[in-house]
Image: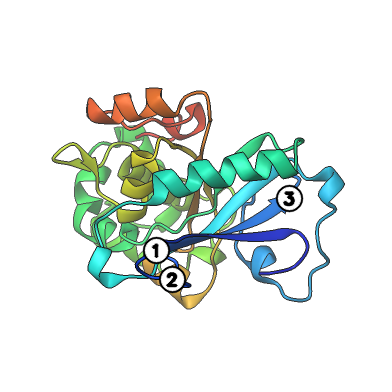
């Protein structure tokens, strides 16, 4: 995490010298990251910084429990982006690779209402794949218990991605995103950019979100626009996410 193709930045206060209030770890790569394991691989060769076009924020941590709920992310990320652009003028993309910690528990409670939104033809095809006469929340949730075994063209896999897109892009409470990580990044002006299959195959990743992770994109020219959309109760998302909506 401190190799030549990595950077770590912290936000400090004079009252707590030497202790960051929040810090972010950054990987400099040549494309948007689709999985956490390559970023954490201690034996992987460092990226060629001359070819780096993308900065991936892959770990953002608040360090002071007493300041939970106070967001320093906006100030930190702006400063980080400015600093990185000065050091690496070729960087064009600033994005995260983020967990979706609330997704699995939410899906367990809302699978039925999501299945109800499927067209009859879609339900029939899904039932055929599951080898059941009628698709129920129970048999769908059972089918996604081992997501890493689902083939690429599986309808179950596709539906799981659709459910995640709904959770991130349309799941709101009191006008705010349901997911805590989504609230942080969307509140700082990012948009939901891309879902990544099997991006975190660890036990924790499977327990939180069936192995899914998401990229939030910080488009520096549209941060204020995205914040304005969110204030209107509309989550800014890419067309790729919109295409996944049920």
| Residues under numbered marks 2 and 1 in contact, where contact means CB atoms less than 8 Å apart | yes
Q: Earlier in the sequence, mark 2 or mark 3?
A: 2
Give the camera-side residue of 172 and 135.
172
**Which residue sits furthest front?**
14
Q: Secondary structure at mark 3?
A: strand
Give the camera-side residue of 92 and 21.
21
Q: Earlier in the sequence, mark 3 or mark 1?
A: 1
Residue at the spot 25% in from the left edge and 52% down from the top edge: 111
Residue at the spot 62% in from the left edge and 52% down from the top edge: 34
Q: Which residue is mark 3?
A: 29
**Which residue sits furthest left?**
174
| Residue 164, x across and y down, in percent | 38, 48
Q: Is residue 46 left or right of residue 149?
A: right
Q: Secondary structure at mark 2?
A: loop
| Mark number, residue 17 | 2
- Residue 245, relative to residue 212: is it above or below? above
Camera-near label (2 vs 3) is 2
Separation of disc 3 and disc 1 at Cα? 33 Å
Separation of disc 2 and disc 1 at Cα? 5 Å
Q: Quadrant of the C terminus?
A: top left
Q: Which residue is mark 1?
A: 14
| Mark number, residue 81 | none
Q: Is residue 159 visible?
A: no
Q: Quadrant of the N terminus?
A: bottom right
| Residue 170, x across and y down, in percent | 28, 36
| Residue 154, x across and y down, in percent | 52, 50
Q: How many neighbours does mark 3 have within 10 angstroms: few (below 14), some (14-19), or many (20 or more)? A: many
The image quadrant that residue 244 belongs to is top left
Residue at the spot 21% in from the left edge and 52% down from the top edge: 110
Give the camera-side residue of 78 and 45.
78
Q: Is residue 190 left or right of residue 187?
A: right
């Amino acid at each position: 995490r401190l190799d030549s193709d990595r950077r770590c930045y912290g936000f400090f206060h004079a009252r707590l010298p030497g202790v960051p209030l929040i810090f972010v770890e950054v990987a400099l790569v040549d494309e948007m990251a689709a999985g956490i394991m390559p970023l954490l691989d201690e034996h992987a060769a460092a990226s060629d910084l001359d070819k780096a076009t993308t900065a991936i924020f892959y770990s953002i941590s608040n360090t002071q429990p007493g300041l939970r709920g106070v967001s320093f992310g906006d100030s930190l990320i702006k400063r980080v982006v400015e600093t990185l652009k000065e050091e690496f003028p070729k960087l064009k993309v600033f994005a995260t690779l983020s967990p979706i910690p609330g997704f699995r528990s939410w899906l367990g409670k809302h699978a039925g209402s999501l299945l109800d939104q499927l067209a009859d033809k879609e339900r029939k095809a899904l039932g055929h794949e599951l080898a059941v006469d009628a698709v129920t929340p129970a048999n769908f949730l059972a089918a996604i218990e081992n997501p890493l075994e689902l083939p690429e063209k599986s309808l179950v896999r596709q539906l799981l991605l659709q459910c995640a897109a709904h959770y991130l892009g349309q799941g709101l409470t009191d006008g705010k995103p349901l997911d805590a990580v989504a609230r942080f990044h969307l509140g700082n002006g990012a948009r939901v950019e891309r879902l990544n299959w099997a991006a975190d195959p660890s036990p924790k990743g499977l327990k939180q979100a069936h192995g899914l992770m998401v990229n939030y994109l910080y488009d520096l020219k549209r941060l204020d626009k995205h914040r304005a959309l969110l204030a209107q109760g509309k989550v800014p998302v890419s067309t790729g996410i919109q295409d996944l909506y049920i």
